[in-house]
Amino acid sequence: MPLYITVFLFYNLLLSPLLGVTVVYLLGVDMNRLGGIHPNIKEEVFLAVWFSALLIIFFIALALGVTRRLNLRNKAVFENDVPSRPHLILYQCLFLINCIYIAFLFARFHAAIPLVQLLFGSDFKTSLSLARDAHLTGSISIPYISKFFDFLNLFLPLFGLTLYLDKRLGKLFLLLAYVVSISYLSMDLQKAPAFILLLLSLFITVQKKGLKIRHLLLFFVSATALVSMFSIFMSKSIGDMFLYLLDRPIFGQVQGMYYMFQYYAPSFDAFFTKFYFSNFISSITSIAPDVYIIDYVYPGAKHIVNVNTYFIGEAWAYGGPMGIIYFSILVGIIFFVYAILFSLFSAFHTRVSYIISFIFFATIPINQSLQFVVFQKYFLYLIIFFVIPLFMLFYVIRKWDSYSRAIVNKAANPVRD
C-alpha cells in the first residue's frame, strides 16, 4: 500500500473521525463539546461514521488491488531514484520564488498578518481577530496566486527533504526551507498545516530510509518546538497546548456532525451552496448546514463563519439516512478513482509526483466539506493552481538543462573536417 494512502487512513480517517466518535460513544468522553446531544444521536453518528469509513476503505482496497504492481514500481523508484541536476535547479528556483513572494506578502500586508502582529506585541485575541478578518476578506492573499503558494509551502520542504536524504542538499538549506514554509503556513495562526508538514516529513523519511529511532526523536523534538511556540503565543502551558491540539482533531473535528444530526432538518435545498460560483446564483437561498449550526455549537460567537466537520454530517443534512448511504457510496467511488489516478500520476516524474500525492491525501478536506469532495473543487485547485504550473516550470528547466549540456558537449568535442 502506498504510504500516502497510509497517511490518509491514519490522519483523515483514524485520528479523526473514527477515534473521536468511538471515544464519545463507548467511553462517553467529549471534552464538554456535546452538552445537550441526545444519546441516540451519539449512537447514530457512531454507526454512520463507521459505515462510511469502512466503505471508503473497501473502495480504496479494491483500487490498490488493481494497481498493486504499479504501486510497487512507484515505491521502488521513489526510494532509489537518484536526483538529477534539473531536480536541484527546480528546488532552487522554487525556493527563490517562494522567498520573494513571502517577503512581498510580509512587506505589503504586515499590518494585516496575524503572526507579524503577534510577534510585534499584539495580544493573541487581537491577532485572532485579524486572522478571522483575513479569512473572511482574503486580505493577506492574492487571488489564485496564493493557492499555488499554499501548496508550494508544503511541497518545497518535503522535496528538499528527499534531496537531503539522497545527500544532494545541505542541512542549512533544508532548515531554511522549513523555517520559511512554516512561517507562511502559520501566518494566519492556523496550527494544522505546520503539523501536517511535520507528519509528512516523518512519513517520507520512513519511506526513503526506513523507521529509525533518531527519525522519531527528531519528529517529536520538532513537534515539541512547534507546540512550545504556539503555547507562548496563546499563553498556555505546554501540557495544556498538547491537550488543546489533541482535542481539536479528535473531538473538535467531529463536533459539528452531532449538531447537524440533532438540529438540522434534512433537506437537499442547501446542497449547491458551495457549488462553483454559487455566490452569483441568486436562486440559492438555503443556509448551509455548517453555517446553520453555528449558534448551537458556539452560542453568541460572532467570529465563527462555519463549523467544519466530517462529511457524513452534511450527508445527513442533505438526505437523512438515505443521504448517508448514497453519499458514503459516492465518496467511496471517488476515492477508488483517486487511488487509481494517483497511482498512475506517481509513475510520472515519481520524485515530484509522489510528494504531491502525499500532500493531496493528507489535506483533502473530507473532514471539512462534503461538497469540496463531491464537486472536485479541492482536486481541481491542486491540478490547476499547482500541478500544471509546477510541471510547466520543470519542463522548461529540463529543456534548458538538456540544451545547455548539448552546447557544452559540442564545445568540448568540436566536429573536425
Image (spheres, rainbow, N blue to C red):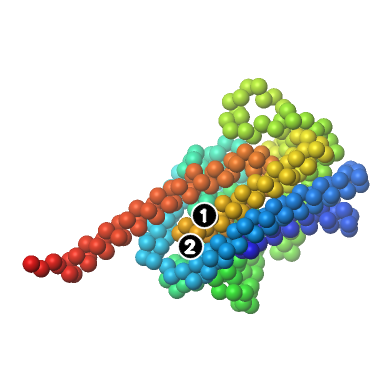
- Seen at 59% across and 70% down, the residue is 206
- Seen at 59% across and 44% down, the residue is 378
| Residue in the foreground of this view, choosing between 320 and 29 | 320
Q: Quadrant of the C terminus?
A: bottom left
In the image: residue 125, left or right of residue 22: left
Q: How many marks?
A: 2
In the image: residue 117, left or right of residue 308: left
Query: Where, by quadrant of the figure, is residue 23 drawn?
Result: bottom right
**Residue receiving disc 1:** 345
| Residue in the foreground of this view, choosing between 326 and 89 | 326
Q: Is residue 196 above or below residue 268?
A: below
| Whole-percent x, y for residue 202 in the image | 60, 67
Numbered label attached to residue 158: none
Q: Quadrant of the N terminus?
A: bottom right
- Seen at 85% across and 54% down, the residue is 24
Between label 2 and label 1, give the one nearer the viewer.
1
Can the viewer see residue 183?
no
| Whole-percent x, y for residue 177 in the image | 48, 61
- In the image, farthest residue toward the left: 417
Separation of disc 2 and disc 1 at Cα?
11 Å
- Seen at 17% across and 69% down, the residue is 413
**Residue receiving disc 2:** 351
Q: Amino acid at mark 2?
A: Arg
Can the viewer see residue 224?
yes
Q: Amino acid at mark 1?
A: Phe
Secondary structure beneath dot 2 equals: helix
